[in-house]
Amino acid sequence: MLDRYDQRLRQLESLLRISRAITAHLDLTSVLNLVIEVAVDLLAGNSGLIALRDDDGVTRIYAASGLARETWPAFTDLLATPIDDQPTLVRRLREVGADIGLPLRHVSALPLVFRGATVGVIYVFRAALNVEFTAEEHQLLTAFADQAAIAVSNARLFQSVLREKQHLDALIENSADGVMILDSRWRITTFNRAMEQLTGWSREEAIGRPCAEVLAIHTPQGANLCLTDCPLQRQPFEPNPVAEGWITTRDGRRLYIQSRYAAQRTPQGAFLGAIANVRDVTEQKIEAEMQNTFISVISHELRTPVSIIKGYAETLARQDAAWDAATLREGLMVIIEEADRLAQQINTLLEASRLQTDGMRLELSDWPVRPLVERVVERFMPQAGERFTFEIDIPDDLPPVHADYERTRTVLENLVSNAIKYSPNGGLVRIAARVSGDYAIISVSDQGIGIPFEEQKKLFRRFYRVDNRLRRETQGAGLGLFLSRVIVEAQGGRIWVDSRPGRGSRFSFTVPLATPMLSDRTAAPEAPSTSSEGTSEPPAMLPPYTEPPLLEDHEQ
Ligand code: ADP
């Protein structure tokens, strides 16, 4: 009687140990090892094992007591035997015993069942010949089978949660958008790779910091929006608030970003945390601003000639006035000139929009550079008047180029027109050409207002105009250099600028030579850039350009 009581106590103690182990750690193997060890001990067995059915339907041994790991493969047939077929089970066990050199004679096997599903089997083996497992002992094993089943299902649940988490982590990490997760104190707990690239903050530095520090979104007035108008604190709470504005990245870039938040709150509205989706929309912002500028510039550009034409036409049409022939002619000349200007503006606009949709069709032929340059200079002479001097610097032996003549003329006209437009005090305009590798470099230098370095890269974008006094005083839509870049690049060349504020500018572009200069063949300039940025630097591989950078320097 006492024996039975003792045994019951031991059993309870063991079960308690096992349940503690189950709650203390989620390592399945160590829990199963404990279960089988205790079960073998309590059932006075010699050995035992726990086999689980894996997701692929195969049953594998996960833990054993008294059986070396090398012997496990010998149990394959036994594991495949239905456990309610006791005679076969015993026969197979004895075969295994003979196989591995262990006296295995009796077996008690029970399924591990959790919520109605069998997840595996627990086996306890005995060596003594005539000591079979009693029904009571079999019953005792049930408690261990139940515990093992709980451990297995816990571990599998944990595994699947872990897998889900890994899946989510990978999704967040590889998202093209910046993603960061905030805790209830607005501190960053997750910071993905795109976020690192966007903000210039490394994950190690960003995690743990307040998001208002790492992603300090500023209003156009310069206030930190995250501190003055945190989108997650706006009242009433918005389900998915958005904040957008400028940030300065850790490495000094200025970006316009858009950040969308999904907040988690208690039913009372207390903030529990949020996930933020951050996008760099600088390009779109600049584009939108340029479109706005463009609309105002273009309406002004088109309206001016129209009102001049209308004014002159109305005056000339007045019935109460008798105009002499000279006045009439003068008035009509103005109307013609303004109509021409209007037509030219419309052409430029059409060209720009056509380029966007169709690309460019070129009519290539071989032609010498000098006559083109002379033609362009002649055209600008009247407009340049006394204030400008033109200089053409082209060696007589410059070989012909292979390009679209009319389009190249447009480029040169744009550059010469700008040289005049942006030189309020007049001065020298020099057009030079020389050979470099398989290309001719044509350049237009002026002694005008020059261009700040940080603006130089942007000049070749659509609608871009430098914001200075002359921008308001001169006409233009910021399309000339954009069109020039597209033409030059379509011909396989490059266009760039050297300039310093107050010291003039030199715009240069390359045109392919009709016959490549085999003897002088240095590396050819790289393929035309397809970026929308344009470039302000000469192709890296062109030999140094020996002409003094700017006219003013040259004169000093
Ligand atoms: P637009 O002259 O119609 O404004 P462009 O595309 O030809 O458009 O030129 C873009 C901007 O580049 C101009 O608005 C001007 O600010 C600047 N720019 C172009 N050429 C010169 C130059 N030679 N000197 C100074 N600034 C220039």
Image (spheres, rainbow, N blue to C red):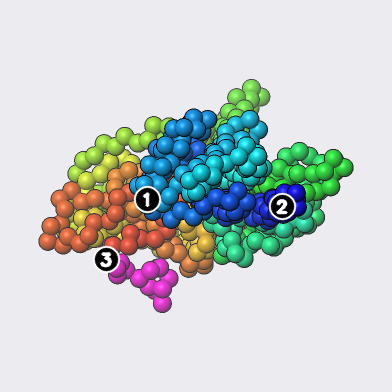
Q: Could you tell me if residue 318 is visible in this image?
A: yes
Element on which disc 2 rests: helix
- Residue at 47% in and 57% down: 457
Q: Is residue 368 among what the camera can see? A: no
In this image, 436 relative to 495: left or right? Answer: left
- Where does the image place residue 184, in percent across and percent down from the top left? 77, 53
Disc 2 or 3, which lies upstream in sequence?
2
Q: Nearer the viewer, residue 94 or 202?
A: 94
Could you say where residue 79 lies in the image, as x and y percent from the top left? 45, 38
Q: Is residue 139 magenta?
A: no
Q: Residue at x 29, y 47 (%)?
A: 492
User: Do residues under tags 2 and 3 come within 8 Å of each other at their CB atoms?
Assistant: no
Q: Nearer the viewer, mark 2 or mark 1?
A: 2
Which image quadrant for residue 324? top right
Residue marked by disc 1: 100
The question of residue 553 being in magenta is answered with yes
Where disc 1 sits, the SS reads helix
Mark 2 vs mark 3, CA separation in Å: 101 Å
Q: Residues within 10 Å of mark 1 (few under 14, many from 20)?
A: some
**CA–CA distance between discs 1 and 3?**
82 Å
Residue located beneath label 3 in the image: 543
Q: Residues within 10 Å of mark 3 (few under 14, many from 20)?
A: few
Q: Is mark 3 within 8 Å of ligand 1?
A: no
Q: Dot 2 corresponds to which residue?
A: 3
Type of secondary structure dominating the magenta stretch: loop
Q: Is residue 72 above or below residue 392?
A: above
- Magenta stretch bounds: 542-556
Q: Position of residue 373 (x, y in %)?
A: 30, 51
Residue 92 placement (x, y as % from top left): 41, 38
